[in-house]
Image: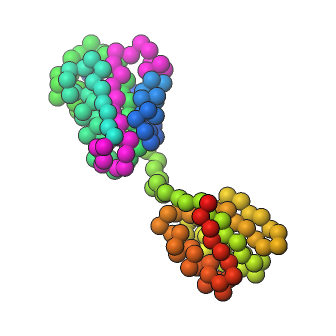
């Protein structure tokens, strides 16, 4: 996302940041990409949406609380977690004042978030399902309904599926497999 405000150019980039280390590594990569920038300000929220347990920010030479804090506030209220925002500024010769800087940095993050493609994070558990051939179609339907990710299928004496199942669906999967196979199928957490 790029904006020009009072001849200063602001380039805002976002990335997935499941940890503070990932966020800092991304900041370093952006800083290396734009080594001649006047300021490279950043903020991250490496936890779930709205969580302040793993956050960080930097004004990178801008007046105190005019860049990192507005960026972080925008991230925290953006409904996205595990994210880092870096705003690279090329000074254009016109001073924006503290209010103008705060608005410019938060605006860049807000616009970048609006264009961001997201997907819900689903915690998954690896499982192995053993069934007879007669139950394959039923199991495939069950796995689709439970949004399981099939990682491997093995057809031998019995059929073995290795899957990543949403944590909240493991118990339901066990019950559904038992019902579909009349108790002959099994589900094992790996």
Between 37 and 126, the one lying in front of the other is 126
What residue lies at 57% left-to-right and 73% top-to-bottom?
173
Q: Is residue 113 left or right of residue 107?
A: right
| Residue 64 location (% of width, % of height) | 20, 23
| Residue 22 location (% of width, % of height) | 46, 34
Figure quadrant of residue 66: top left
On screen, residue 112 above or below 126: above
From which residue to which does the magenta span run? 31-53
Figure quadrant of residue 139: bottom right
On screen, residue 123 above or below 58: below
| Residue 106 location (% of width, % of height) | 27, 35
What residue lies at 41% left-to-right and 44% top-to-bottom?
82
Between 123 and 111, the one lying in front of the other is 123
Between 105 and 174, the one lying in front of the other is 174
On screen, residue 183 above or below 47: below
Q: Quadrant of the N terminus?
A: top left
Question: Does 73 lie within the magenta span?
Answer: no
Residue 82 in view (yes/no): yes
């Amino acid at each position: 996302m790029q904006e020009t405000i009072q001849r200063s150019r602001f380039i805002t980039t976002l990335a997935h940041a499941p940890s503070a280390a990932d966020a800092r590594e991304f900041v370093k990569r952006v800083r290396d990409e734009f080594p001649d920038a006047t300021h490279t300000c950043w903020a991250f929220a490496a936890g779930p949406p709205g969580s302040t347990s793993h956050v960080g920010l930097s004004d990178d030479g801008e007046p105190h609380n005019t860049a990192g804090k507005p960026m972080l506030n925008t991230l925290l209220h953006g409904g996205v977690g595990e994210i880092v925002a870096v705003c690279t500024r090329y000074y254009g010769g016109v001073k924006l004042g503290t209010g103008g800087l705060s608005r410019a940095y938060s605006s860049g993050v807000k616009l970048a978030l609006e264009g961001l493609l997201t997907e819900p994070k689903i915690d998954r558990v690896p499982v192995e399902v053993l069934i007879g051939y007669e139950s394959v179609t039923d199991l495939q339907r069950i796995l689709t309904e439970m949004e399981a990710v099939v990682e491997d299928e093995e057809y031998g004496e019995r059929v073995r599926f290795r899957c990543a199942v949403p944590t909240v669906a493991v118990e339901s999967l066990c019950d559904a497999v038992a019902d579909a196979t009349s108790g002959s199928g099994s589900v094992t957490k790996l």
